[in-house]
Image: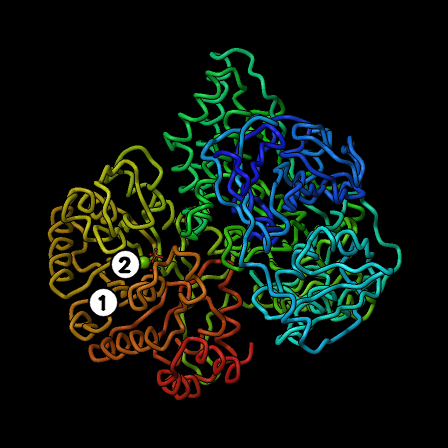
């Protein structure tokens, strides 16, 4: 890139790793609202002038300035993200507003450690503030920059792009006065947002304040107004769209705004005065519910505890070994988390950790870190820079999934830094309880999966986030932990300080800060009622459940271990409706032998004290992978070798299991359940095999054999299967996945993966009708069986056994006892004619309010 009479070259204002703007962890910069440019992750502590010019704006807090080049281009330099909140701490400007500077002159010195610790990021942005008049014509392809030396951008006048002022001037003028609501006044972020709001409209807008006037097109002049929060600013607009522009700009200036650049609470200061928080909506801060439930507690901000690595290494060999050990430790930690999630059948959660393990092995990442270590950097520094650079590359891609992987990489970067820190990984630091039973509502901009690792469930009663969506990884984890969770609460949440009493209501999607006595009493009574109801349900759970009109419904438990079996008994389960045997062996290092099957199943049967158990044969494959199987990877594992299909390539595996099961001596009935059967020939072949193995072992050849109905073909052919099966158990998780063609582990489609979809209900109806023709009974063991809204529907469609997680047994029994079977049957038929899962849910809420 060369400077010509028409172009301006901008050199690096600071040394560091270059990032595209899209990689900046702040949408205001990443979405280009401040203008085009690039970002630098700084490796030096002084901001220098990228070109000759005049300082036309210097933030009072010293963290940002704008330099105007002689050609008129205005270059915004902003150190770190959210650094206005530091109120000048850590920044020492070397120039004054109005000063003339030469390229390379020092502009701002900053305390790297302090800023890095207190701000959310050190990433520094250089952007063209008057993008209407100047554009970026070229940019460097380098990965790193030297302050004052590396040419980063070539800037050129935009020419014809400048708006035609005369046209606007001749148009009628409109005026409106607004009161600035943005905390901190008209600083860079709300100014950029206001400018963005009017983009594309045919209007020229100016802001008048304190005798000064600024064009909306110039960020610098907007900042120069120095208008504080609460200031009355007059907006003057001309042009065809003047009215619309006034509406849009006024809206931006009058709202507090999501992601506002304002002080992050740092002091633990309980709010003494009860009553609604100043400026907060009286009916609570609206958010999006990501996990249900109500919690009353004290707000506490989760603060980043990622240690700052030293840049210089202590010898190449030592740093290499430190990185190797840290990566191995994180890999083991992730493997453990993934296994624990799998054992809870938290497939989506397990998938997140498994994916992080795959990223950890990324050879490009490891090679990049290795190169930096070889150049004398510390392991932590090298790993952080390698993950940041790769994350920046991913975020620059148009594919949203890639951008999500970038967030995963940064999370992984944090984990490794914590592992490398002398004290090892730092879990969330929670304040000591103020009183007995004091619980915490943990807040963050957005949690990452690693933030939630090791969360103290006894102290944290709810999670609340300013950003994030209901399908973010943290939201998925919260749901699976059973903690109420609210996301997208915006800047209103960020205004709350540590110690604020709050009610997090995951049912109505609101966060109430400093609730008044009336609200507190209502929430406390809701929490108490729930607890009382749970206790009453548990007391009644040990008796069998029937509908009001006397139809018995067996409520059984899904289990995956001996502990689960004991838990099922404690919660009053009538039986075990599904023993997921694969969970007993998924994480071993070799295929289980027949004796292993006998031992584990015998222990479970003994724990059930005479209750019946349905033992499903190994359902390995798809989201349940067993490393010891060493199967070749499949493009579509959910449609491949899983369930009984596995026997096609590993017949010994299922034979060993059947031999093992047939040797169990249980005091209650033991039944065998076959997963992923899709047609009657398969069932006949398995029945034959079971008879042969029973004959070989000298045991009962007529042990009951059921079929999982989880493939649509099995539901449609239920009448044929029922002729040869003793019972059916509907796996609604897979039946929904296969009927709706939605991957059950795909978080973005999670909201649509609803078993109450009428298409799935028709599959269930086909199954119960087919079964009835041969007098067979039908159970449901998928998650739908535990959904209170679905219970009456399933009962109405003819299901007579519901198998659910042990903790849900008491509630499901209570729900069954409140229903009329005749009414359920009639209304369930009507639901089949509705067009969507949402319509079914609405109808269920009306027919059978919880
Ligand atoms: C199901 O598919 O609904 C089921 C119960 O089986 P799993 O979740 O183990 O696949
Ligand atoms: Mg299944």
- Look at the numbered discs 1 and 2 and tell me whether their residues touch, using CB distance below 8 Å: yes
Q: What residue sits 35% from the left and 65% below the top?
A: 732
539 w.r.t. 835: above or below = above
Q: Quadrant of the C terminus?
A: bottom right
Q: Residues within 10 Å of mark 2 (few under 14, many from 20)?
A: some
Q: CA distance from mark 1 to mark 2?
A: 9 Å
* Residue that carries the numbered disc 2 in the rendered image: 671
Q: Is mark 2 within 8 Å of ligand 1?
A: no
Q: Position of residue 48 (x, y in %)?
A: 67, 30
788 w.r.t. 415: above or below = below
81 w.r.t. 694: above or below = above
Asked if residue 703 lies left or right of residue 756, the reply is left
Nearest the eye: 751 or 320:
320
547 w.r.t. 517: above or below = below
Nearest the eye: 274 or 626:
274
Q: Position of residue 289 (x, y in %)?
A: 58, 64
Q: Indicate the quadrant of ligand 1 in the picture.
A: bottom left
Q: Position of residue 254 (x, y in %)?
A: 74, 66
Residue placed furthest toward the right = 273
Q: Earlier in the sequence, mark 1 or mark 2?
A: 2
Q: Residues within 10 Å of mark 1 (few under 14, many from 20)?
A: many
Q: Position of residue 85 (x, y in %)?
A: 75, 44
* Residue that carries the numbered disc 1 in the rendered image: 726
Q: Secondary structure at mark 1?
A: loop
Asked if residue 809 lies left or right of residue 644, the reply is right
Asked if residue 485 lies left or right of residue 779, the reply is right
Q: Is mark 1 within 8 Å of ligand 1?
A: no
Q: Which mark is residue 40?
A: none
């Amino acid at each position: 890139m060369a400077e010509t009479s028409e172009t301006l070259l901008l050199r690096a204002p600071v040394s560091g790793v270059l990032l595209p703007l899209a990689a900046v962890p702040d949408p205001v910069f990443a979405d280009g609202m401040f203008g085009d440019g690039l970002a630098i992750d700084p490796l030096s502590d002084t901001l220098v002038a990228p070109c000759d010019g005049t300082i036309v704006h210097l933030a009072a807090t010293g963290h940002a300035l704008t330099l105007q080049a002689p050609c008129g281009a205005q270059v915004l330099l902003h150190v770190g993200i959210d650094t206005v909140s530091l109120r000048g701490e850590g920044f020492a400007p070397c120039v004054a507003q109005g000063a003339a500077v030469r390229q390379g002159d020092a502009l701002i010195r900053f305390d790297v450690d302090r800023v890095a610790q207190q701000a959310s990021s050190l990433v520094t942005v250089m952007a063209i503030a008057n993008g209407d008049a100047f554009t970026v014509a070229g940019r460097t392809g380098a990965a790193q920059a030297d302050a004052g030396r590396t040419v980063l951008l070539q800037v050129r006048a935009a020419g014809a792009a400048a708006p035609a002022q005369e046209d606007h001037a001749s148009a009628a003028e409109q005026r409106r006065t607004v009161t600035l609501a943005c905390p901190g006044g008209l600083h860079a972020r709300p100014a950029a947002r206001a400018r963005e709001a009017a983009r594309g409209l045919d209007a020229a807008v100016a802001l008048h304040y304190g005798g000064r006037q600024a064009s909306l097109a110039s960020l610098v002049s907007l900042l120069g107004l120095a208008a504080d929060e609460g200031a009355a600013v007059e907006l003057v607009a001309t042009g065809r769209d003047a009215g619309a522009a006034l509406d849009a700009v006024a809206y931006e200036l009058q709202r507090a705004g999501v992601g506002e650049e304002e002080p992050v609470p740092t002091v633990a200061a309980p709010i003494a005065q009860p009553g609604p928080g100043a400026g907060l909506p009286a009916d609570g801060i609206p958010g999006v519910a990501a996990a249900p439930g109500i919690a009353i507690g004290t707000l506490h901000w989760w603060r980043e505890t990622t240690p700052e690595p030293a840049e210089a290494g202590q010898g190449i060999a030592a740093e290499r070994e430190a990185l190797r050990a840290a990566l191995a430790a994180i890999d083991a930690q992730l493997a453990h988390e993934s296994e624990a999630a799998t054992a809870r059948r938290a497939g989506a959660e397990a998938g997140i950790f498994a994916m992080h393990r795959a990223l950890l092995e990324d050879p490009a990442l490891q090679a990049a870190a290795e190169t930096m270590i070889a150049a004398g950097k510390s392991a932590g520094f090298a790993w952080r820079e390698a993950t940041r650079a790769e994350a920046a590359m991913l975020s620059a891609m148009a594919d949203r999934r890639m951008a999500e992987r970038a967030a995963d990489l940064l999370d992984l970067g944090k984990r490794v830094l914590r592992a490398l820190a002398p004290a090892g990984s730092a879990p969330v630091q929670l304040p000591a309880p103020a009183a007995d039973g004091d619980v915490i509502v943990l807040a963050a901009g957005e949690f990452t999966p690693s933030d939630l690792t090791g969360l103290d469930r006894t102290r944290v009663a709810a999670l609340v986030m300013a950003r994030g969506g209901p399908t973010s990884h943290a939201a998925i984890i919260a749901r699976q932990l059973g903690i109420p969770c609210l996301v997208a609460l915006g800047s209103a949440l960020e205004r709350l300080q540590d110690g604020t009493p709050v009610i997090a209501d995951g049912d109505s999607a609101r966060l109430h800060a400093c609730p008044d006595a009336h609200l507190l009493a209502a929430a406390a009574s809701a929490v108490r009622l729930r607890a009382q109801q749970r206790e009453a349900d548990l007391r009644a759970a040990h008796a069998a459940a029937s509908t009001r009109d006397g139809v018995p419904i067996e409520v059984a438990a899904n289990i995956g271990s001996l502990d689960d079996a004991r838990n099922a008994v404690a919660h009053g389960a009538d039986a075990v409706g599904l023993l997921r045997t694969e969970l007993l062996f998924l994480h071993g290092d070799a295929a289980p032998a027949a004796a292993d099957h006998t031992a584990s199943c015998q222990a479970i049967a003994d724990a059930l004290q005479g209750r019946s158990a349905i033992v499903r044969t190994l359902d390995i494959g798809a989201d349940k992978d067993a490393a010891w199987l060493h199967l070749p990877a499949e493009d579509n594992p959910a449609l491949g070798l899983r369930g009984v299909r596995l026997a096609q390539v590993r017949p010994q595996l299922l034979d060993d299991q059947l031999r093992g099961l047939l040797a169990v001596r249980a005091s209650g009935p033991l039944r065998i359940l076959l997963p992923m059967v899709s047609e009657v020939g398969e069932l006949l072949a398995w029945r034959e095999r079971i008879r042969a193995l029973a004959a070989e072992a000298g045991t009962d050849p007529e042990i009951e054999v059921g079929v999982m109905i989880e493939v649509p073909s099995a539901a449609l052919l239920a009448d044929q299967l029922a002729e040869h099966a003793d019972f059916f158990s509907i796996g609604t998780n897979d039946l929904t996945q296969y009927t709706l063609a939605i991957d059950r582990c795909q978080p973005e489609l999670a909201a649509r993966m609803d078993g109450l979809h009428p298409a799935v209900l028709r599959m269930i109806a086909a199954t119960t009708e087919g079964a009835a023709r041969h007098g067979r009974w039908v159970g449901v063991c998928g998650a739908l069986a535990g959904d209170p809204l679905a219970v009456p529907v399933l009962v109405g469609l003819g299901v007579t056994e519901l198998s659910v997680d042990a903790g849900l047994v008491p509630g499901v029994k209570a729900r069954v006892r409140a229903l009329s079977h005749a009414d359920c049957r009639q209304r369930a038929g009507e639901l089949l004619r509705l067009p969507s899962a949402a319509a079914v849910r609405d109808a269920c809420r009306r027919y059978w309010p919880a």
